[in-house]
Amino acid sequence: EARKDREWTGRPTRTKDGKRLEIAANIASPQDLEQVLANGADGIGLFRSEFLYMEGTTPPSEEVQYQAYRKVLEGMGDRPVVVRTMDIGGDKEVACLGMEREENPFLGCRAVRYCLKNPEVFKVQLRALLRASCHGNLKILVPMVASAEEVRQVKTVLSEVEAALQEEGIPFRKGIPLGIMIEVPAAALCSDILAREVDFFSIGTNDLVQYTLAADRMNPKVSHLYSHYHPSVLRLVGTAIRNGHQAGITVGMCGAAAEDPGLLGVLAGMGLDEFSISPTRIPGTRRRLSEIHTRKAADQVERILEQDTAEAVLEVLGKERA
Ligand code: PEP
Ligand code: MG
């Protein structure tokens, strides 16, 4: 099996009916690059930049961040590199930023909320990203977005950073694609509105499941309720893909659902453009996707979304392989 998968390293990903898909990698640090290249990723679909903030006792400087982003961008050549702006808060406590303890951190000042509250911290990261943009094919991804207002505020901060760099004569690439995570139900439900504001979506099922089903992703007592097979989650995923495509933007997925062999047919059938997964899962996922007929898979989607429980969805998926 492993040997069969290895034959798929570095090949373009095509479904049985010839649709081209992107298989990208999720990484947490520039050290992961070796694995990414060894497994032939089409790009980096998610660089979890918050890990840079979890290492030391002080926040990483602009220079330290610039070097980290540059290294990944150069390593990937012209292939796209999606860097997610810091997703701190929630389960990721960051000591060096002196964040206050919260009663419900997953519903608190997390990710984009923290960044908009602390623009001086956010701007350091954006400056580093913009400077690094000269060295490859950078895209910026914003986590935890729940409303169009947040996207507009991010764009305002970003244009302030661009203006400052311009003023200082520091080079950066103009028009870097800006995307948002679809990981809060509000964002999926209003994805038609949000799609007008951004260049791409990346669906984060790890959080989308927890927020949709109100089941803490870290709490074993409710882990039986936490499932990306739940029809409510799959309906939101379908909504986001449809709305993204209607607005002409690409839709990827970087949550764990994107590497679940059981869901590849449903996701390909819904029209997902990019699967961003653990580097080592790339060859196997590429092989499995090559066996899927997207138009046949699409016929199955409607029936899946009509099931009443996650278990029922699993049963249908088990019986009918697209
Ligand atoms: C997600 O929520 O699905 C995701 C990819 O982000 P993280 O797991 O880092 O929250
Ligand atoms: Mg998330």
Image (spheres, rainbow, N blue to C red):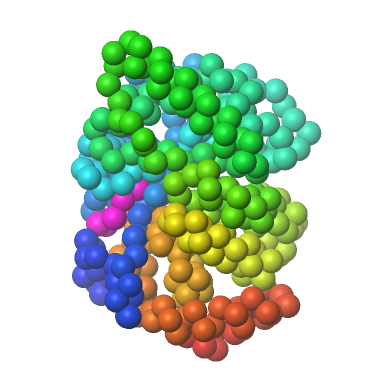
- Image: 61 above or below 226: above
Of 3 and 238, the residue lying toward us = 238
> Which image quarter holds the N terminus?
bottom left
Quick check: is 43 in the magenta stretch? yes
Percent coordinates x, y for residue 166 in the rendering:
34, 17
Of 321 and 297, the residue lying toward us = 297
Residue shown at 30% from the left, 30% from the top: 173
Q: Is residue 123 left or right of residue 189?
A: left
Q: Is residue 27 left or right of residue 210?
A: left
Instruction: Identify the image quadrant of residue 66.
Output: top left
Percent coordinates x, y for residue 99 in the rendering:
65, 23
Q: From which residue to which does the magenta span run?
A: 39-44
- Image: 260 above or below 141: below
Residue 277 visible in the displayed image: no
Residue shown at 53% from the left, 43% from the top: 197
- Image: 288 above or below 151: below
Quick check: is 264 in the magenta stretch? no
